[in-house]
Amino acid sequence: STEEQQTEDYLFKIVLIGDSAVGKSNLLARFARNEFYPNSKSTIGVEFQTQKMDIDGKEVKAQIWDTAGQERFRAVTSAYYRGAVGALLVYDISRRQTFDSIGRWLNELHTHSDMNVVTILVGNKSDLKDAREVPTREGKALAEAQGLFFMETSALDSSNVNAAFQTVVKEIYGILS
Ligand code: GDP
Ligand code: MG
């Protein structure tokens, strides 16, 4: 057989979690399709999107799951988390309340998935400089205390969006390969 046929196939399930309207769906839209929706409603959420990525010259597929807005009712089901090896735990730097919810989301993640799920804390909407309610150092400190990666992103201006997904996928690849 040819070398192509011997290529290993990596498929990593990654979940997006965090309060409603922090920008989860737009992070995925920006990452997978380079799109942004200025007035998105929860209905734009797809169940999941599979994105091919290049990690150290190997093709890796990230299957990224998005909620369909059910987080508003605190009703994200265990099926959503099942088999996840990575998670983006998202808050909005312009809404303190979404940062205060992070502990609850972390508990839920650990209840429904493996303790070793590779997790990055993501402070989204870094473009909203004048409306910032959560200083960068607070996000960083929480991430360090909980053993999470950390990054501030903007789905609007694209900053760090690829980097956030890459960080998670690279780490998973390093553990599983
Ligand atoms: P979700 O409920 O967590 O999936 O949040 P959405 O992706 O639907 O985004 C909620 C709202 O925030 C929408 O009006 C988006 O346009 C807006 N939004 C998302 N990401 C950003 C961002 O990085 N910067 C700004 N300024 N707005 C954003
Ligand atoms: Mg959404």
Image (tube, rainbow, N blue to C red):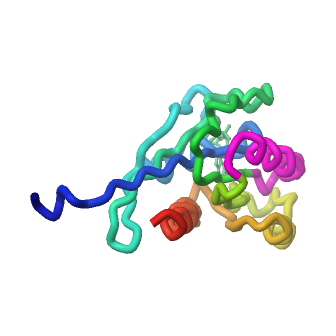
Residue drawn at (87%, 58%) of the image: 133
Q: Nearer the viewer, residue 100 or 159?
A: 100
Count of residue discs? 0
Report the residue at 51% width, 61% height from top. Answer: 169
Left or right of 36, for residue 58: left
Rendered position, 138 above or below 88: below
Residue 92 can be seen in this image? yes
Q: Is residue 41 visible?
A: no
Main secondary-structure element of the magenta-colored stretch: helix
Residue stretch rendered in magenta on the structure: 91-114
Could you tell me residue 112's position as x and y percent?
72, 40
In this view, which residue lies farthest toward the left? 1
Residue 17 point in image, percent of width and height: 69, 44
Q: Which part of the image, by quadrant, shows the N terminus?
A: bottom left
Give the x, y percent position of residue 20: 74, 37
Does residue 163 lie above or below 43 as drawn? below
Residue 106, how many percent across, how many down? 79, 49
Image quadrant where residue 93 sits: bottom right
Q: Nearer the viewer, residue 83 or 67?
A: 83
Question: In the image, ligand 2 is in what quadrant?
Answer: top right
